[in-house]
Image: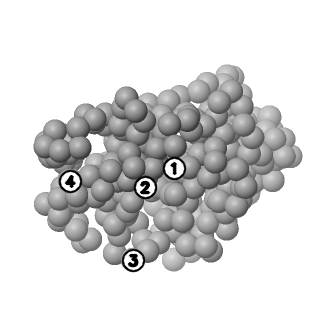
Amino acid sequence: MKPPAFEFLRPETTDEALDALHRLGDEARVIAGGQSLVPMLNMRLARPSVLVDVMCLPALASIREEQGAVVVGAGVRQAVLERWPQLSCKVPLLAKAMGWIGHVQTRSRGTVCGSVAHADPSAELPLSLVALKGSVRLASRRKKRTLAASDFFLGMMSTAMAEGEMIEAVCFPVAGSGTGHAFREIGRRHGDFAIVACAAVADENSTTLAIAGVDDHPRRFDLPQDDGDGLDDALNDIAWSLNARDDLHASARYRRELVRRLGRETVMEARACRR
C-alpha cells in the first residue's frame, strides 16, 4: 500500500519545528529516521496530514555526557550511537542491546528517540531505557519537561507525550563502578521483534530486571540478592504478574517460562560481570 497524501515540512530550527507542532496539533507527526512511522503510513495505521522532519536540526544531532547521563538527541541514528567509541564504557547495557535492534539497514536509518517515541512493547531501546532508570526530555512551544522512562511508557505504542510535544533527547545514566549489566533476547530470528527480552543491572546491594515482549510496555522489577530459591520464586511471581498473551509467535505459557529461564540467565550474567 501507499500512504495517504501529506504535506512535508523541514524546519531549520527546533523552535520552527515546535511552532509547527503547536499550530497543527494532532494533524502533524514528527518524523526522523522513519523506520517506524513510514510502515505505519504505508499500512494507513497513521494518517497525519503533515510530517515535520527534525532529522536535520543541528541542535538535536549530538551525543554528549551531561550530569551523569549520556544524552542522545532526537536526530541521532541508532547506528551512530552503536559506533560511538565510549558507549561500552559509559552505558554497557546499551552497548549489549544495540546489536539486537532490527538489522544493520534499519539501524542505519532509524533513530534512538524514534524507537522510544514509537513505544513498541518488544523494542530494545525502550527496554534499556526503563532498565537503566533513564529519562525522556520533551519540548513544546510552551515548556520543556523531563519524564522518567517508567512514567513515559503507558501501554502498547502509547506514551505520555502530549499534543504539540516532541522528544528532544533521551538520557541513559552512566554506569557506576561495581555494576554489572546483561541483555538477552529470544525471537524467531535475529532481528525480529523479541518474543521476550530481558535486561538486568546488578551491583553489590541490588538487582534490577526489566522485561519486554510480554506486557504492553517494558516493566522493571527489583529482585532479591539470593541466587537460589528466592530468585526463582521472585521470577515466578513476575512471570504470573505480567499480562502474557497468546499470539502468532508464542503462547502466554511459553512467554512466562522464558521470563523464568531467560530472566535467571540474564540476572546471573549481570551479577557475574560486575566491575
Which residue is disc 2 drawn over?
A: 183
Number of numbered discs visible in the structure rendering: 4
Q: Secondary structure at mark 4?
A: helix
Give the CA separation, mark 4 to mark 3: 21 Å
Is residue 78 visible to the viewer in this orientation of the structure?
yes
The alpha-carbon separation of the residues under discs 4 and 1 comes to 20 Å
Q: Which residue is mark 4?
A: 260
**Residue at 34%, 66% in the rendered image:** 186
The image quarter in which residue 170 lies: top right
What amino acid does circle 1 point to? Leu
| Mark 3 to mark 2 CA distance (whole Å) | 16 Å
Q: Earlier in the sequence, mark 1 or mark 3?
A: 1
Q: Is 72 situated left or right of 251 in this image? A: right
CA gap, disc 1 to disc 3? 21 Å
Q: Determine crowd level at label 4: few under 14, some 14-19, many 20+ residues with C-alpha closer than 10 A.
A: many
Q: Which residue is mark 3?
A: 189
